Image: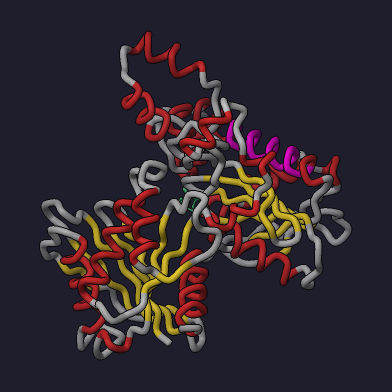
């Protein structure tokens, strides 16, 4: 079975074509500047040369048509016709409290994604555009929606409710939803496998990338996570503030003379390690600058590390212990020093890193010492594979 996985943004669209017989990626690509001047598609068949199509893509339908052209190209394509694509899996950011698992796209499902737009105003409209474009271009191919929030729907009320007037929850569904769900699900399931498939494990998963979140997982089910109603809550990130005193908003808005829209933009785009360092949101740039003596770059890394460490401790307390800590995403997979600095502080709960085993990047491994009470794992995430597997499962049952 061939499954096309699509992650549609407002002006971009990423895709991967999976051959599910052996779960390999046949090709992947990225459309950029959809609806703008200078749009282009970069298509890369696995093991082959990348091809760039600089063609106008006024909308997502045009983008999907160009993706099909690339996938069926006689030279750089990987299928003969679109009939060889059996299903499409879409990443959808926000499923609200309506979806606790992936679903086949139907009219009521699309209506529910639409109703959830107020909770995911930047992403859900774009995700819907991707779905609508595929429906238009390949009307007979089943489509599946995989939600970033779904895995976290098992959180208990005590973890997902904010201490606000209750009616905000009842009337507007203001609550913690959490994101990166497919990633936390994938790495926690893999960790359980790598630890011998034991039942009841307490795992803390750390997705540390440009956007970062932690999840507390008991017996395979999420019991808490750090992102909230939106992906702004929790850890300081590349450009997002993470959790701050909510009173800061009014205080700064009055002095900087900015409205709430601009303030929200500042919290999302100009804060985090970029805001602290003043130089970059990218941890590699920060590491380099810190090594050259830039104090604020070093401070940004230190604040990030401190917050991850503190949250791991709090999730261990919430679960009454932890059997494993798992690191993933750009920073979690590729920065041994960051992992060491975090785990070195967790000796009190029985976590010990093995410096030699930890000296890896982008590979699956158990990096704690043999006598470490808490196992520490590095597991490269694979959200696209989660989407492809869910899509295959749903479509196979049709
Ligand atoms: P996202 O998918 O959220 O955009 P990623 O998971 O790709 O982000 O993570 C991007 C972050 O990972 C960047 O800050 C980048 O600097 C960091 N990163 C990637 N490789 C390394 C590395 N070798 N050392 C430190 N940080 C790295």
**Residue sitting at 37 percent across and 62 percent down?**
108
Foreground of the two, 279 or 229: 229
Residue drawn at x 49%, y 77% is 394
Q: Which residues are magenta?
A: 302-316
Residue 363 higher or lower than 85, as above or below = above
Residue 13 screen position, x and y as percent: 29, 61
- Indicate whether 181 appears above or below 287: below
Pick the front one: 166 or 249: 166
Whether residue 338 is visible: yes
Q: Quadrant of residue 203?
A: bottom right
How many labels, in total? 0
The quadrant of the rendering that contains the C terminus is bottom left
The answer to whether residue 291 of the structure is visible from this angle is no
Q: Is residue 193 left or right of residue 52?
A: right
Q: Where does residue 88 sit, x and y in percent of width and height?
A: 36, 74
Q: Give the image quarter of residue 67.
A: bottom left
Magenta stretch prevailing secondary structure? helix
The percent position of residue 75, horizontal first and vertical second, equals: 22, 86
Residue at image coords 40%, 48%: 116
On-image quarter of the N terminus? bottom left
Depicted 65 relative to depicted 255: above or below: below
Q: Position of residue 286 (x, y in %)?
A: 48, 38
Q: Is residue 67 left or right of residue 375?
A: left
Q: Is residue 394 left or right of residue 43?
A: right
Residue 34 magenta: no
Residue reaching furthest to the top: 255
């Amino acid at each position: 079975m061939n499954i096309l996985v699509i992650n549609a943004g407002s002006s971009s669209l990423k895709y991967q074509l999976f051959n599910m017989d052996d779960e390999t990626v046949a090709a992947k690509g990225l459309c950029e500047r959809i609806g703008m001047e200078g749009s282009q598609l970069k298509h890369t068949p696995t093991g082959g040369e990348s091809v760039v199509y600089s063609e106008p893509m006024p909308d997502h339908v045009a983008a999907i048509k160009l993706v099909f052209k690339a996938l069926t190209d006689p030279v750089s394509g990987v299928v003969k016709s679109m009939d060889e694509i059996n299903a499409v899996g879409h990443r959808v950011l926000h499923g609200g409290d309506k979806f606790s698992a992936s679903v086949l796209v139907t009219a009521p499902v699309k209506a529910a994604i639409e109703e959830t737009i107020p909770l995911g105003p930047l992403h859900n409209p774009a995700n819907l555009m991707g779905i609508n474009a595929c429906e238009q271009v390949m009307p007979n191919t089943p489509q599946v929606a995989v939600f970033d929030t779904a895995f976290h729907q098992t959180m208990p009320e005590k973890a997902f409710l904010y201490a606000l007037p209750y009616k905000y929850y009842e009337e507007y569904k203001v609550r913690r939803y959490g994101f990166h769900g497919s990633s936390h699900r994938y790495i926690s399931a893999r960790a359980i496998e790598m630890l011998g498939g034991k039942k009841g494990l307490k795992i803390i998963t750390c997705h540390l990338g440009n956007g970062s979140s932690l999840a507390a997982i008991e017996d395979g089910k999420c019991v808490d996570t750090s992102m909230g109603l939106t992906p702004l809550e929790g850890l300081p990130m590349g450009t997002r503030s993470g959790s701050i005193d909510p009173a800061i908003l009014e205080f700064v808005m009055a002095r900087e003379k900015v409205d709430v829209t601009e303030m929200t933009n500042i919290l999302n785009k100009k804060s985090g390690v970029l805001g602290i360092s003043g130089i970059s949101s990218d941890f590699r740039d920060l590491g380099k600058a810190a090594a050259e003596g830039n104090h604020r770059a070093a401070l940004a890394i230190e604040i990030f590390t401190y917050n991850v460490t503190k949250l791991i401790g709090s999730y261990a307390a919430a679960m009454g212990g932890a059997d494993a800590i798992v690191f993933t995403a750009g920073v979690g997979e590729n920065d041994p020093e960051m992992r060491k600095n975090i785990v070195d502080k967790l000796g009190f709960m029985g976590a010990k890193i093995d410096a030699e085993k930890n000296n890896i990047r982008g590979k699956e491994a158990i990096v704690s010492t043999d006598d470490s009470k808490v196992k520490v794992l590095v597991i490269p995430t694979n959200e696209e594979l989660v989407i492809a597997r869910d899509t295959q499962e749903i479509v196979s049952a049709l």
